[in-house]
Amino acid sequence: EIIGDVIFQNLKGDSTILEIKNFRVAEIHRHRGVGSALESMLYSFAKSNGFKKIWVDTHQDNLDMIHFLIKRRYVVEIMTLSMPIKEL
């Protein structure tokens, strides 16, 4: 049983930034320290491999992740993307 996972890579164009592509904890294992343990291991990995920053891209409606990041002192920037409607 997989209870959580993190997928990450170097941010394209800047090898000093570690980009988190996916960060997941199975719902039945949330609020039990699994996410904190994953984030702590990721932080240690980033620091020991010369990264200067960790970048997390999440959807603005992913309030659980945004709260998780704020609680761990990440700087949260809200960005929106508006797409024009194509007239038919």
Image (spheres, grey):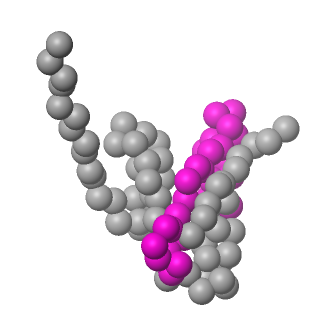
Among the 4 quarters of the image, the one containing residue 75: bottom left
Q: Residue furthest left?
A: 87
Q: Quadrant of the C terminus?
A: top left
Q: Where is residue 51 shown, x and y percent of the image?
A: 55, 81
Q: Where is residue 22 shown, x and y percent of the image?
A: 58, 49
- Residue 9, relative to residue 33: is it above or below? below
Residue depicted at 50% across the width and 68% down the height: 11
For residue 21, side relative to residue 71 (left or right):
right
Q: Residue furthest front?
A: 88
Q: Is residue 67 visible?
A: no
Q: Which range is magenta?
A: 11-37
Q: Nearer the viewer, residue 88 or 33?
A: 88
Residue depicted at 68% across the width and 37% down the height: 26
For residue 85, side relative to residue 53 (left or right):
left
Q: Quadrant of the N terminus?
A: top right
- Residue 28, relative to residue 57: is it above or below? above
Q: Where is residue 86 shown, x and y percent of the image?
A: 19, 23
Q: Where is residue 7 shown, x and y percent of the image?
A: 65, 55
Residue depicted at 40% across the width and 42% down the height: 59
Q: Residue furthest right?
A: 1
